[in-house]
Image (spheres, rainbow, N blue to C red):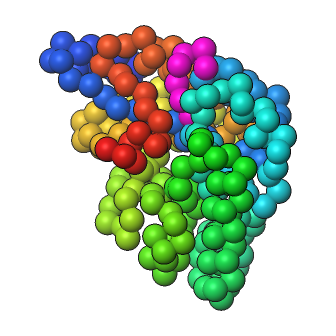
Amino acid sequence: MFDTLWRDRLDQLAAEGRTLTLWLRDDDAVDVTPALDRLLTLCERHSVPPTLAVIPEKTGFPLVEYLARFPTVEVAVHGWSHQSYSKPPAKKQELGNDRPLPVILNEIQAGLGKLQALHGQRFVPMMVPPWNRISSEIAEQLPKLGYRSLSVFGRETSSPLPLLNTHVDIMNWRGVRGGKDAETVYEELVSYLDQPVPALGLLTHHLVHDEAAWNFLENFLRMTAQHKACQWRRASQLMAS
Ligand SMILES: [Zn+2]
């Protein structure tokens, strides 16, 4: 039902000559894996340009060489090691106030430097904090370190630097840890047509997709790529506008 509603609402936008801007952020890439290949092949088939939030610490040349096949893929910074330093029951967080600020700033400066050196043209100076959490003290320092954008989850709020958020996560992290059922994802998507955001961000995690997640993604990319109301954009294009 919500998938039909979604389609109807897009048809309506198209009839009014309006467009919906979309972007895709995929988290946790480090290395070349069958799951990454599946994601990028799928995106390429539908001309959707994904932004990979890459964990800097352990990544290297194999990913750089592999990405050469995909000219529209962009790379952003996903923390440094993707390790949580919070003390349970606090939620997991790498970029929180659990360690001295200079230690953290050194890491995220190194992360930007490393990924920029490795990925050159496809690198975007965007911080994607692991678990979508960052303390305001750290966020305030990002511009000084060369970051031009911050990407977390949910509606954009005020921030020390421009936000390019994701809004709809295709994974269900509670319970089964598989893909959400498609109806739930479409219901969330429709809610963002009711109260629009500058660019609607879809969040994926290629390493943990089950077949439900892959199926949704395949159908969603095919549907939106062919729809007149939809325009998929790279992070760099949205950061520039
Ligand atoms: Zn992550």
Horizontal placement of 124 versus 6: left or right? Answer: right
Which residues are drawn in magenta?
A: 44-50
The x and y percentages for residue 3 are 41, 19
Q: Residue at x 32, y 13 (%)?
A: 228
Total label count?
0
Q: Residue at x 72, y 33 (%)?
A: 67
Quadrant assignment, res 40: top right
Q: Quadrant of the C terminus?
A: top left
**Vertical arrangement, residue 108 with respect to residue 27, above or below:** below
Q: Quadrant of the N terminus?
A: top left
Q: Residue at x 51, y 36 (%)?
A: 24
Residue 49 is a magenta residue: yes
The x and y percentages for residue 200 are 38, 38
**Vertical arrangement, residue 70 with respect to residue 83, above or below:** above
Magenta segment main secondary structure: loop
Residue 237 is a magenta residue: no
The x and y percentages for residue 137 are 48, 81
